[in-house]
Image: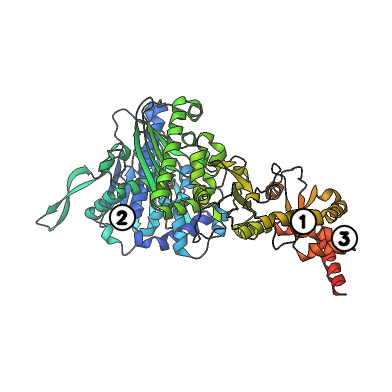
Amino acid sequence: MTTENAIHDSRQTLGFQAEVKQLLHLMIHSLYSNREIFLRELVSNCSDACDRLRFAAIAEPTLLPAGEDLAIRVSYDKQARTITVSDNGIGMTRDEMIEHLGTIAKSGTREFFAQLTGDQRKDSQLIGQFGVGFYSSFIVADRVSVLSRRAGAPAEQAAHWESDGGGEFTIEPATRAARGTDVVLHLKEGNDELLSGWKLRSILTHYSDHIATPIRMDKEEWDKDKNELRPTGEVETVNRASALWTRPKSEISDEQYREFYKHVAHDFSDPLAWTHNRVEGRNEYVQLLYLPKLAPFDLWDRKRTHGLKLYVRRVFIMDDAEQLLPSYLRFTRGIVDSSDLPLNISREILQESRDVKAIREGCSKRVLSLLEDLAQSRPDDYTGFWDQFGAVLKEGIGEDPPNAERIARLLRFASTADNGGKFSSLAEYVGRMKAGQSAIYYVTAESVEAARSSPHLEVFRKKGVEVLLLADRVDEWMLSFLTEFEGKPLTSVAKGDLALDALDDEQDKEDKRKAQDEYKDLVARIKESLGDRVSEVRVTSRLTESPACLVVDKDAMSAHLQRMLKASGQKTAPTVPILELNPHHPLVQRLRGDASDLGEWASLLLEQAILAEGGQLEDPARFVKRVNTLLLAGTH
Ligand code: ADP
Ligand code: MG
């Protein structure tokens, strides 16, 4: 802060948003052992502020007079025990300070916090998801003051913000000689080792070397007489100050790639993998794309912004350019720097540009290759990716037909095959198919456990045929696009004909013929008694333990999908199911002989079958009554 900068009266005290308070607390406690990151976060914000000013000046050149140099300044004051991080970037108005430094501007934050556990180790991983880098100042400071003036605003319209990281902050009008922001940290006891040029430089080299804007510090030299480091009066740049992605890959360390990720993704964790390429030809651009380790808490929030950071010839243009990637790859973070697009490109133009379309295709292919490499060379990490983002990637099967085959190879499923608890790919499934098996079988349900205990699996267990267990909301939708893999149809175990006949032996075939004959009568009577509640009644070879189950025709909507649509409030014409009976079950066998109460028994079989596949009864009380009546009748 220079002497020309002054703070006016009329100080206002405001409260932090409740979530900010919780977060501050969490942050201070869980990140203390890694407290140096405060500097990385503050410098990251300065760099963003410079990028945003450069961009604003494209439309409004007076904001950045020609020849003016944008820079970040880091200094310290041993006596006052402060560290100051400044920039001459875009700055903030008073209202922006209140909003950006007092709230977390993400929908769903409150709900998310409400369900946080006390497990701090776990929680500290989540901190990075909120875009809360600024608050990391309070890990080392017990008082933080920010003086900022927005580009284009007069000197006396600056504002001063201050807080001790408790529940409140103050804001008041101030004067600042030039546009930009100073963040002053008043260090807590025990942090004096940070009051050293050497220490600050080494933190900056470690975490912030990739920052494209120069970071400057006072040059210091050893003073033999005083036996200490003294400023020489000169200023030096302590980072490489060139855009990381423009450097040759061989000159970038993994560490630098990781730190750059944290800056662009506003994440505190390391990335899972990345890919960095210069694309040449008709469209020239550089892409540096990352896969995060953890899904953000609001991955499924439709309003959430996502996308890549777009640069044009190293000038930052926009965050979250959604057009650069299809929605099913929305977990990808990183940058694209185009050599061809105009600097004044808008979101609207992005949508129509053919160059952007080419970049989007290029980026999709790169992300898919990155995933393929990961699946191949680091299968455990790929499983980690799948856990976090698999359900998102599945959307690609329908969304990106040209790449659907590649995406299908990347899919992973729980399965009835004991695979050491591992997920299976479709290719692995096909590799395990039995001689004579012509289809890939799956079952969908609300959860993997429910899928695993579905009565439809009985015959598959008997014949030793593997079934994939699907329980993601998107699965049914995906399956409407994914009808085959390597020429093998994907077949629901709950639909029509199972095509398992080839696996039958002579005895099986004989049994089936006999059952058809013997149960002709009973089947007809049960159908008559159930009327419109079922479209057909038939004898099945699908079951070994349960008396009955429901199936639908091959092209009809599955019961699971119907339930999901109903739960989401959509009206669908209900598919009337087929009731299949197990001729080997004693209950069914008994009905063939004894016809009394047949109506009641038929209803009971139907209702049981509905319950067994996770459905709901229209009249549960009536069901209970029916069961009790039949139980009592059975005890006579
Ligand atoms: P993030 O950087 O992820 O958005 P931060 O907590 O680091 O989250 O910063 C919060 C917001 O405060 C930023 O998005 C920005 O709008 C504002 N901000 C912080 N530091 C500066 C700065 N030096 N110049 C301008 N704006 C800033
Ligand atoms: Mg930040």
Which residue is identified by label 2? 82
Q: How is the image coloured?
A: rainbow
Residue at the disc numbered 3: 598
Q: Earlier in the sequence, mark 3 or mark 1?
A: 1
How much space separates mark 2 and mark 3, taking CA atoms?
87 Å
Badge 2 or badge 1: first in the primary sequence: 2
Q: Amino acid at mark 1?
A: Lys
Residue 84 located left or right of residue 600: left
> Which of the two discs, 3 and 1, sits closer to the camera?
1
Q: Is residue 181 depicted above or below 342 in this figure?
A: below
**Where does the image place residue 120, in percent across and percent down from the top left?**
46, 64
Mark nearest the camera among 2 and 3 is 3
Q: Among all residues in the image, which is located at the extreme front?
A: 506
Q: Are marks 2 and 3 in contact (CB under 8 Å)?
A: no
Q: Marks 2 and 1, how far apart in space?
A: 91 Å
Of residues 41 and 364, the one nearer the viewer is 364
Nearer-the-camera pick, 15 or 369: 369
Between disc 2 and disc 3, whose residue precedes? Answer: 2
Q: Residue under circle 1? A: 514
365 left or right, relative to 297: left
**Residue 345 horizontal/vertical position (percent):** 44, 27
The yes-or-no answer for disc 1 within 8 Å of ligand 1 is no
Is residue 329 at all visible to an observer of this figure?
no
